[in-house]
Image: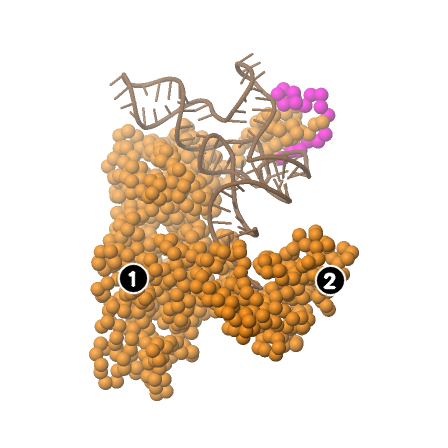
Chain colours: A orange, B brown
RNA sequence: GCCCAGGUGGCGGAAUGGUAGACGCUGAGGACUUAAAAUCCUUUGUUCGAAAGGACGUGCGGGUUCGAGUCCCGCCUUGGGCACCA
């Protein structure tokens, strides 16, 4: 079956083949197959109200080329698509219109599906997933319960980022420079009861797992930096006289003899204890102000240090020196121990602080090449002794070096000193080695309507204890060892899971989707849903009081948008499986995606959270095939407006994919996005540029089809030159697809068609060329393929291979250089020796001009390429 | 401030240390056409030259090499990430 058209009528051709692929399930992936599998994954889109963006098809086309290429290579390919459909815009739309967010979400999904289908991707549409579908989020909730059961989900009254505009709590990762990532609204600190996932427990695994996965270096680096592992020493500085100890954490224990003050974070519990009466007032004032300051202000004013002396002192455990204790907000309560030893000579921040408050600076580390300089043995307190100006200007000296003025540790290197000091501290019991992370636990609850409800009930402590004591609570083996509870108005509430049978816990209907002003989820308005009665033996839930049922309150927070995207790649493997999140057989077969493509903006958030869940699921035996979810990752670049700036409505440089498809067709759009430049680069869209690839496709059409719409006659045999070009093209296209260099693959195909147009090719070569082009431009090639009499899809046809013997030319070009400059070229037989080439070269007048009267120093011959003569 | 990736014609971009500018766009000239569109052909880094041909040329300055866009050192600049993490 083909289309009845004479010209390249993509408006007829493209919908025809799209429907045929859909109807015949051409790209259906089998869960049981003797074939080797290949799983290509796109980061699934959030179906926004504005429809598909021109950037979406970039990644999708790249993955599609790979998918079709793998099909042609005999793989059983899984290339699915789905919708990350929970999210704020849908909720805001619901607030504005009063309409349930699912209605708008469904509409947007439909639009996205149509748009994506209009681009002809080889997707298995039977595996579509939607994170807002209860059949999907049932398992998101189930995973949450597993995390809960294993003690990885807990509640805490935490200072969190609260965004008044969005009326929601945000995760650390969602706050950028004191503003919300979404919407760019100001955020503030607020204490709220929150669900938190203990991602920190996986810090080391998340770090180690990066080692042998094929990811962009920059993304790995970002995750490494985000996890922020550091090894150091915790030391005790005893408050004088005989007070409690201040625990500090340092990665530079080698500088401990250079400590000239300690700093406590304003929120540190010992602040009051160390403060002397005469300083109490100003310390309290300082702490109070620091608390009021948002983190934005605290970081914004980072340049200008502030702090107050407490009047108290502590003893340096290494040398017994009395060290003044300060309070300053450049020390954060949330990292390390909330207290530091300050070594101004060897730390920029401490140095700045010491300068401002006139605190002594004591140098204890010198660069290795300086240590031999005379006069260095003597201790010098640089403050107030400006003799050695050079030295002073060198401070702070933050690099590793050699210790001076450090008692028994003198002359050790930084590395040796750290080791010996740690040993001593541990022996004498005033310190211990410690590992710290910048990574914080993941704030997992949101005060929103449009998210997965957290499947938890809250019951009073007395009920909880009794049920456990009686040993017949349904949740006996479903709760963590450590009770998750919180106190409110003198009552302690304990978290219990709802029974698995009651999943999915669906969102209740409410009158309003607006959170309350005090930061409670809109779900609190659903009173009937909220207050229930539960039977602790059976897990049954009732809306009315009954014998054997006790009152319970539902958790009203919902999950963040990241939840659904943490495991969708698993659901694609068996989207309809009812007994678990993934069918173990399907998981064993598909393992994990072989290729994952999506934007670099997800380098830390989604990609870290998903890894965390996957590692957890693997550890707890729920998954068994792959420890890491994404073995190979690629980030496509961003397509800018034609003015070179980011596409935005306000700039008026937005390109609408529907418009492009209408004007040039899906094949042109796909081809152009791939031809634009390297896949990972940022590149501007050009309206004229797409004309070029459109012309190319028209040229391809005209090469196969005559003016009457009939397939042309081809040559019986290829000219040797075109034969070589064909095999070069097979080679180049194949290699470029493997390395994702689609722009140069397309350039090679253009070269081929330009030559073929002039010289003509055999029928067989014409068929091969279509196969090469098929992953890039599937519609036009499928149509021409069918017109050539083929009855099965071109993407399933065996991928062409090149014949290496055909790549060898019988005559080759040799470049003649004088002193490395190209002066002439000659054509010789490909088996010509250097001697023969020199003989020919010496007959070239043009070349000889540059040699005449010169002394020949040297001749360099690069076989088959260059003869370079060095003259003087 | 720190870390990373870039900087090549009018434009997007090609180039395992070996002919810089493939391929495409744009511009110029031509063919076909009554005309236009489409298509096809020639040409298109700068500069000197009538031409043949020469000189210069991959952000800037050095270096290594027979030979550097590519490797090394220093700098300028654009983009991305991190940012008091002790």
Q: Looking at the image, is A314 positioned above or below residue A367?
A: below
- Precedes in sequence: disc 2 or disc 1: 2
Residue at the outermost right position = A374
Q: Looking at the image, is A544 positioned above or below residue A250?
A: below
Point out residue A718 in the picture as x, y percentages from the top left corner: 43, 32
Q: Which class describes the residues within 10 Å of circle 1: few (<14), some (14-19), or many (20+)?
A: many
Residue at the outermost bottom position = A470
Instruction: Confirm whether residue A491 shows in the render.
Output: yes
Instruction: Confirm whether residue A413 shows in the render.
Output: no
- CA separation in Å, label 2 and label 1: 65 Å
Q: Which class describes the residues within 10 Å of circle 2: few (<14), some (14-19), or many (20+)?
A: few
Q: Which mark is residue A379?
A: 2
| Foreground tag (2 vs 1) | 2
Where on the picture, by quarter, is residue A469? bottom left
For the N terminus of chain A, the quadrant is: top left
Q: Nearer the viewer, residue A408 or B5?
A: A408
Q: Nearer the viewer, residue B79 or A79?
A: B79
Q: Which residues are magenta?
A: A845-862
Residue at the outermost front position = A278
Point out residue A458 in the picture as x, y percentages from the top left corner: 32, 76
For the C terminus of chain A, the quadrant is: top right
Query: Pointer 1 indicates a residue of which chain?
Result: A
Residue name at image x 65 percent, y 27 percent? A818
**Residue indicated by mark 1:** A450
Is residue A545 rendered magenta in the image?
no
Where on the picture, by quarter, is residue B40? top left
Where on the picture, by quarter, is residue A660? top left
SS type, badge 1? loop
């Amino acid at each position: 079956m083909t289309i009845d058209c004479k010209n390249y009528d993509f408006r007829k051709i493209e919908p025809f083949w799209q429907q045929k692929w859909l109807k015949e399930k051409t790209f259906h992936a089998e869960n049981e197959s003797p074939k080797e599998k290949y799983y290509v994954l796109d980061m699934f889109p959030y179906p926004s109200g504005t429809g598909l963006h021109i950037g979406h098809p970039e990644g999708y086309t790249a993955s599609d080329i790979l998918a079709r290429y793998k099909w042609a290579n005999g793989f059983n390919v899984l290339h699915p698509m789905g919708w990350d459909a929970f999210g704020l815009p849908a909720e805001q739309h619901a607030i504005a219109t009063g309409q349930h967010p699912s209605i708008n979400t469904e509409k947007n999904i439909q639009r996205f599906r149509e748009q994506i289908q209009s681009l002809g991707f080889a997707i298995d549409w039977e595996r579509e997933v939607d994170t807002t579908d209860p059949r999907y989020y049932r398992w998101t909730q189930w995973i949450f319960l597993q995390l809960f059961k294993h003690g990885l989900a807990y509640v805490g009254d935490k200072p969190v980022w609260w965004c008044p505009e969005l009326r929601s709590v945000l995760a650390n990762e969602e706050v950028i420079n004191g503003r919300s990532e979404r919407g760019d609204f100001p955020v503030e600190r607020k204490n709220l009861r929150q669900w938190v996932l203990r991602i920190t427990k996986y810090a080391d695994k998340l770090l180690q797992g990066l080692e042998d996965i094929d990811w962009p270096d920059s993304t790995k680096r970002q995750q490494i930096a985000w996890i922020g592992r550091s090894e150091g020493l915790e030391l005790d500085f005893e408050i004088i006289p005989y007070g409690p100890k201040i625990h500090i954490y340092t990665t530079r224990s080698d500088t401990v003899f250079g400590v000239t003050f300690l700093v406590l974070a304003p929120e540190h519990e010992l602040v009051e204890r160390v403060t002397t009466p005469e300083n109490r007032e100003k310390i309290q004032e300082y702490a109070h102000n620091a608390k009021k300051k948002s983190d934005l202000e605290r970081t914004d004013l980072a340049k200008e240090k502030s702090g107050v002396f407490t009047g108290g002192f502590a003893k340096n455990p290494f040398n017994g020196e009395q060290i003044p204790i300060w309070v300053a907000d450049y020390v954060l309560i949330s990292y390390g121990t909330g207290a530091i030893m300050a070594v101004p000579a060897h730390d920029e921040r401490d140095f700045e602080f010491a300068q401002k408050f006139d605190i002594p600076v004591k140098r204890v580390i010198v660069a290795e090449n300086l240590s031999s300089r005379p006069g260095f043995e003597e201790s010098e307190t640089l403050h107030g002794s400006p003799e050695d100006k050079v030295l002073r200007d060198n401070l702070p000296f933050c690099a590793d070096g050699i210790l001076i003025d450090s008692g028994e540790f003198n002359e050790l290197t930084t590395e040796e000193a750290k080791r010996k000091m740690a040993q001593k501290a541990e022996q004498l019991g005033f310190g211990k080695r410690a590992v710290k992370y910048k990574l914080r636990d993941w704030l997992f609850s949101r005060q929103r309507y449009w998210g997965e409800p957290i499947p938890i009930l809250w019951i009073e402590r007395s009920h909880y204890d009794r049920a456990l004591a009686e040993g017949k609570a349904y949740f006996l083996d479903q709760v963590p060892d450590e009770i998750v509870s919180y106190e409110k108005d003198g009552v302690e509430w304990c978290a219990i899971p709802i029974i698995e049978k009651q999943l999915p816990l669906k969102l209740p209907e409410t009158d309003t989707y607006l959170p309350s002003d005090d930061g409670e989820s809109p779900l609190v308005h659903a009173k009937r849903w909220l207050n229930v009665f539960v039977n602790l033996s059976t897990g049954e839930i009732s809306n009315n009081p009954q014998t054997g049922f006790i009152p319970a309150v539902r958790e009203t927070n919902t999950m963040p948008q990241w939840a659904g995207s943490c495991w969708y790649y698993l659901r694609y493997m068996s989207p309809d499986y009812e007994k678990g999140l993934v069918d173990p057989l399907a998981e064993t077969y598909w393992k994990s995606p072989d290729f994952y493509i999506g934007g670099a903006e997800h380098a830390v958030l989604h990609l870290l959270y998903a890894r965390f869940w996957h590692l957890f699921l693997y550890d707890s035996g729920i998954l068994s095939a792959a420890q890491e979810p994404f073995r190979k990752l690629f980030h496509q670049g961003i397509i800018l407006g034609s003015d070179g700036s980011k596409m935005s409505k306000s700039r008026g440089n937005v390109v609408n994919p529907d418009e492009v498809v209408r004007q040039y067709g899906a094949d042109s759009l796909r081809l152009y996005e791939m031809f634009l430049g390297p896949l990972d680069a940022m590149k501007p869209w050009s309206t004229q540029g797409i004309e070029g690839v459109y012309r190319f496709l028209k040229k391809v059409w005209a090469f196969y089809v005559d003016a009457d719409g009939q397939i042309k006659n081809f040559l019986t045999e290829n000219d040797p030159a075109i034969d070589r070009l064909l095999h070069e093209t097979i080679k180049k296209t194949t290699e470029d697809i493997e390395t994702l260099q689609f722009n140069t693959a397309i350039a090679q195909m253009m070269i081929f068609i330009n030559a073929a147009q002039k010289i003509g090719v055999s029928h067989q070569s014409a068929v091969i060329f279509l196969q090469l082009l098929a992953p890039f431009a599937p519609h036009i090639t499928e149509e021409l393929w069918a017109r050539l009499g083929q009855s099965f899809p071109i993407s399933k046809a065996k991928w062409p291979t090149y014949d290496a013997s055909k790549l060898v030319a019988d005559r080759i070009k040799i470049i003649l250089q004088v002193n490395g400059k190209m002066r002439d070229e000659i054509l010789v037989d490909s088996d010509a020796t250097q001697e023969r080439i020199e003989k020919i070269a010496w007959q070239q007048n043009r070349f000889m001009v540059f040699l005449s009267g010169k002394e020949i120093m040297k001749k360099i011959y690069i076989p088959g390429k260059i003869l370079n003569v060095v003259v003087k």
